[in-house]
Image (tube, helix red, strand yellow):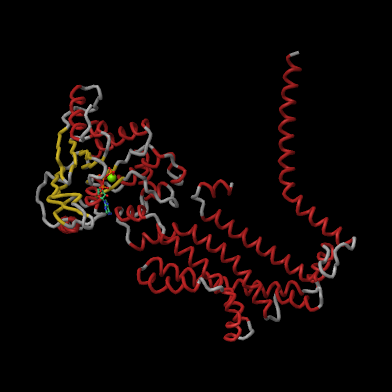
Amino acid sequence: MSETLISLASRGRSQGASGRIALRELGRFRRYLSPLLLVAVWQAACASGFVSTRLVASPWQIAQTAASLIADGTLTSNLGVSLLRAGAGFGIAAVVGVTLALFSGLSRVGEDLVDAPLQIMRTLPALALVPLFILWFGIGETPKVLLVALGATFPIYLNLHKGVRSIDPKLLEMTRTLGLSRLDTIRNVILPGALPDLLIGIRYAVGVSWLMLVVAEQVNAESGIGHMMMDAEDFLRTDIIMVGLLVYGVLGLLSDQIVRFLEAKLLVWRPLARGAAR
Amino acid sequence: MSAALKRAQSELATAAVHAGSHEDGNVAVIVEGLTRRFGDGPAVLDRLDLAIAPGEFVALLGHSGSGKSTLLRTLAGIDPVVEGAVSRPREVSVVFQEHRLLPWKRVWENVVLGQEGKDGRDRAAAILEEVGLAHRIDAWPLTLSGGEAQRAALARALVREPGFLLLDEPFAALDALTRLKMQGLVGELWKRRRCAVLLVTHDVDEALLLADRAVVLERGRIRVDMPVALGRPRKHVDPVFEDMRETLLKSLGVSI
Ligand SMILES: Nc1ncnc2c1ncn2[C@@H]1O[C@H](COP(=O)(O)OP(=O)(O)OP(=O)(O)O)[C@@H](O)[C@H]1O
Ligand SMILES: [Mg+2]
């Protein structure tokens, strides 16, 4: 009698637990449900002729095109060129942005020399400089890389500068009572304290890099994902354009993930970051 | 390093803080005619005099805004001496109301921050053991409780073996139980190390529990200077304790 009771009770508990697990799995799956549904509706609309495939390629068509673009090397070589431009531009922006931010953040002279002009320049939309850049640098790699660099410098500069300037003065006071030298204070307090802001700046800068790259490559280029898309426009190949969009989307997503990973690694001291990393 | 050179150096360190010099072996800290004002306002400290003997525990009381922190910051060397003279030991440590630990350094790294030598972790371990925080030696400061963080701050202050320890309301932000424990701890540590201590507090009981002397800062000067001639450990129920408590409260403008 009592045995039955126990077994009943335990079975009930295990059922509850497995039910909860199943529910959680379903919850995870549910996040992908609506995008998948959207793709299915899209495919159906194209197949039934409801939407002209001249204007919008069907998902299946896009997949096929992507496969053939990869097979003949078009996609890979254009992607390589684009990545190189974005990487070079972002690299320049990182060096310039970090240097300027430290110079203006750590010294009065630097603040006066650097901050004012940069605060004025940042109000200019960088994209408005495209015609000027083409005039100055022609249509080679230089204007494209520099455009990316220009756009990405500002978020890095602004965030790091703010980070350096907003270090808790109480901590700085403490380090003075501990007898730390200026150099030690910069190394132990200011730089690590400004790191979270720098990472935020980098996250924005990566986004801006892709944006600048798209524009630079669509305005004038002989290679790159943007060029591939503009080329396709001439031949009404919406499928190729869509493949380009897809690539941009994946690149944006991936770079964001990399920065998030960096944040989790470098900011382990934040209880929130630790929780997320585990 | 020769003794003479050391002595010269320590004199130099003192000279950075004060204008005059004192050759009195029985005094650790001397403040003479210290005046401090901010901008064109009235003097927060007004020709203040104070002397603390080596190993003496002094509690500093006073209304909010009376200038306790200003005096403490001047003694710590954070604020400059504009008018008057201050002489103090070279090694001075401060614990503030907030722990002021660097969030991106582990507890032990915070404790030996700015200390030279390779045995940092061992030294930190020893001192953390002493303040009862050995089990959190590798923790990140943001994961510490309020009491634990103040223990770490205390360890950081003591690892420097200060001749003079400055405490600016170090327990004010703690809950009543933790505060009692921390008061006990500070009493213990002081008994062992015998450095001069200046404890800023609003808590009359805390002052009477720990200090050899309670002084009250009012209108820029030390207006009450009361020796606390009680045996240790001290009990609240002691009638002398009660009397002193009343005297101090009265001088702070509270009548009971
Ligand atoms: N940097 C400053 N600039 C201007 N005024 C200041 C500054 N620091 C302190 N004061 C003023 O000096 C007076 C004394 O301040 P202080 O912080 O020393 O008071 P306190 O006795 O420590 O008060 P509390 O008990 O509230 O901590 C206050 O009137 C305060 O406004
Ligand atoms: Mg104060």
Outermost residue on the left side: it is B23
B78 versus A67 height, above or below = above
Between B207 and B192, the residue placed more toward the observer is B207
Q: Is residue A212 left or right of residue A61?
A: left
Specify the quadrant that holds the N terminus of chain B. Answer: bottom left
Tell me residue B181's x, y (percent).
34, 32
Q: Is residue A237 left or right of residue B124?
A: right
B180 versus A56 height, above or below = above
Tell me residue A4's x, y (percent).
76, 17
Q: Is residue A267 left or right of residue B35?
A: right
Specify the quadrant that holds the C terminus of chain B. Answer: top left
Tell me residue A169's x, y (percent).
36, 55
Determine the image quadrant of residue A139.
Answer: bottom right
Q: Do we see residue A32 in this rendering?
A: yes
- Quadrant location, ligand no. 2: top left
Determine the image quadrant of residue A189.
Answer: bottom left
Q: At 22% across and 40% down in the image, what residue appears?
A: B62
Q: Is residue B121 left or right of residue B204?
A: right
A207 versus B83 height, above or below = below
Tell me residue A154's x, y (percent).
51, 69
Q: Do we see residue A188 in this rendering?
A: no
Determine the image quadrant of residue A239.
Answer: bottom right
